[in-house]
Image: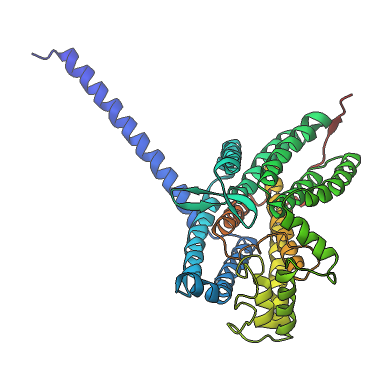
């Protein structure tokens, strides 16, 4: 038999439970409303500008990958669309990743930066022991049958992790504490990539890191010291490694010398493709050099096919698109006042633009062959997905700028208030 006191306590428990359920439903509704607002709310012109250029470059890249890879793909698998099909799948995954990355609040990225750094460093370390070697570079790892290049994702993780660290120290910089620790983070990442003999990716990371530290306010004396060290380290890195790398560099320095090992083959035929294109090109799909005359034509040397098929006009349009992409990054950087966000935008901007310049310079024989893909255009899943993910984070920054317009139009880098020098 229930007593009145039992009934009263039961009613109290029921009311509390109902109240908790209502609060939980209200919180879930608020979160869904916030997510819907982030998805459907109109964004700034700079957001759509960066997104539009990115999507156009990806679509253009798919067309050029189909054209450049059709012959090699037919020889390898009796299917002219095999490489294109894989690249189209990577593009879908990358664009979905870009969308999700742009919807995540910046605080979410800030809180997970260290975890992402440790995860990608662990994957890059695993490459040295269980990695797959391709063309002399041990920079890939197979996970559940999927080939992955951790160094591409490591770029994103290091930018996030170092940006969090510098944002916490930017107002009160200590020479050893700040720049020393930031240098160790970056040097560790570059060392793991270099031990995998991927010199091109290491150079991209080096340029990105030095540029990020310079924009973060590194003292000029220390910056000069880093510049001198870079000038010394790069030739040493070039001279240490596989014989084919040294041979390619030697052949680049002496283009008229005898080349019995064919180190100049790829670069020479790339230049022939550029020359054959003339002003207006041979026409889309009409490249002759893609008929097995240029190794990795859909990857590192896709700009040669662009120049041959679309001519000087097409090549200049591609360069103009990357200039417009860099300008979009810069405009978002100007609108951003938060230290962490500014460092992230700076790092991604330097990474993508410098990689595009190096790839084009290699095809034009201004640099030796380094194995660096053309961002958003060259075939390669890891590079495309990582690059789109990084652009998605920049779009998330611009979402925050648009939501807080008064705080997002400072247009200046934060100045350090006090610099402590350790003895």
Count of numbered labels shown in the rendering: 0
Q: Residue at x 65, y 87 (%)?
A: 282
Most extreme residue toward the front, as rendered? 260
Identify the image quadrant of the N terminus: top left
Residue 328 shown left or right of residue 396 in the figure: right
Q: Residue at x 54, y 59 (%)?
A: 381
Residue 66 seen in this snapshot: no
Is 254 situated above or below 25? below
Dividing the picture into quadrants, the one containing residue 121 is top right
Residue 363 seen in this snapshot: yes
In terms of depth relative to the viewer, which is nearer, 149 or 127?
A: 127
Is 125 situated above or below 383? above
Residue 284 shown left or right of residue 29 in the figure: right
Is 65 situated above or below 153? below
Q: Residue at x 61, y 53 (%)?
A: 390
Q: Residue at x 23, y 17 (%)?
A: 9
Dividing the picture into quadrants, the one containing residue 315 is bottom right
In terms of depth relative to the viewer, which is nearer, 377 or 335?
A: 377
Dividing the picture into quadrants, the one containing residue 325 is bottom right
In terms of depth relative to the viewer, which is nearer, 338 or 9?
A: 338
Residue 286 in the image, given as x and y percentages of width and height: 60, 85
Is 411 situated above or below 260? above
Residue 197 in the image, given as x and y percentages of width and height: 68, 49
Residue 113 in the image, given as x and y percentages of width and height: 60, 39
Identify the image quadrant of the C terminus: top right
Give the colour scheme shown: rainbow
Residue 161 in the image, given as x and y percentages of width and height: 65, 39
Residue 295 shown left or right of residue 95 in the figure: right
């Amino acid at each position: 038999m229930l007593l009145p006191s039992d009934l009263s306590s039961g009613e109290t428990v029921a009311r509390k439970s109902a109240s908790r359920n209502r609060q939980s439903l209200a919180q879930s509704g608020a979160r869904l409303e916030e997510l819907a607002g982030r998805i459907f709310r109109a964004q700034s012109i700079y957001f759509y500008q960066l997104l539009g250029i990115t999507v156009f470059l990806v679509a253009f890249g798919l067309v050029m990958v189909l054209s450049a890879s059709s012959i090699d793909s037919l020889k390898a698998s009796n299917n002219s669309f095999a490489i294109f099909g894989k690249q189209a799948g990577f593009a879908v995954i990358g664009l979905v990743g870009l969308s999700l990355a742009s919807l995540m609040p910046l605080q979410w990225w800030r809180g997970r930066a260290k975890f992402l750094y440790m995860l990608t460093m662990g994957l890059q370390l695993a490459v040295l022991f269980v990695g797959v070697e391709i063309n002399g570079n041990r920079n890939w790892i197979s996970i559940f049958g999927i080939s992955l290049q951790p160094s591409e994702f490591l770029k994103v993780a290091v930018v996030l992790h170092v940006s969090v660290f510098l944002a916490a120290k930017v107002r009160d910089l200590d020479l050893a504490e700040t720049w020393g620790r930031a240098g160790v983070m970056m040097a560790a990442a570059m060392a793991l990539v270099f031990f995998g003999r991927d010199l091109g990716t290491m150079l991209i990371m080096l340029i990105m890191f030095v540029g990020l530290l310079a924009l973060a306010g590194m003292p000029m004396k220390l910056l000069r010291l880093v510049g001198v060290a870079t000038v010394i380290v790069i030739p040493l890195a070039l001279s240490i490694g596989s014989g084919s790398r040294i041979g390619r560099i030697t052949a680049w320095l002496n283009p008229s010398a005898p080349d019995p090992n064919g180190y100049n083959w790829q670069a020479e035929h790339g230049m022939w493709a550029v020359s054959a294109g003339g002003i207006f090109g041979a026409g889309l799909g009409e490249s002759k050099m893609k008929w097995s005359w240029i190794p990795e034509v859909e990857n590192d040397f896709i700009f040669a096919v662009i120049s041959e098929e679309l001519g000087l006009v097409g090549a200049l349009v591609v360069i103009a698109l990357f200039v417009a992409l860099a300008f979009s990054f810069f405009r978002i950087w100007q609108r951003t006042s938060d230290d962490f966000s500014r460092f992230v935008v700076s790092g991604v901007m330097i990474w993508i633009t410098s990689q595009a310049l190096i790839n084009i310079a290699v095809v034009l024989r201004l640099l030796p062959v380094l194995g660096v893909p053309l961002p958003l255009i060259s075939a390669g899943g890891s590079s495309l997905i990582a690059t789109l993910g990084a652009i998605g984070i920049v779009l998330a920054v611009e979402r925050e700028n648009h939501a807080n317009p008064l705080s997002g139009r400072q247009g200046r880098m934060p100045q350090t208030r006090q610099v402590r020098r350790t003895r």
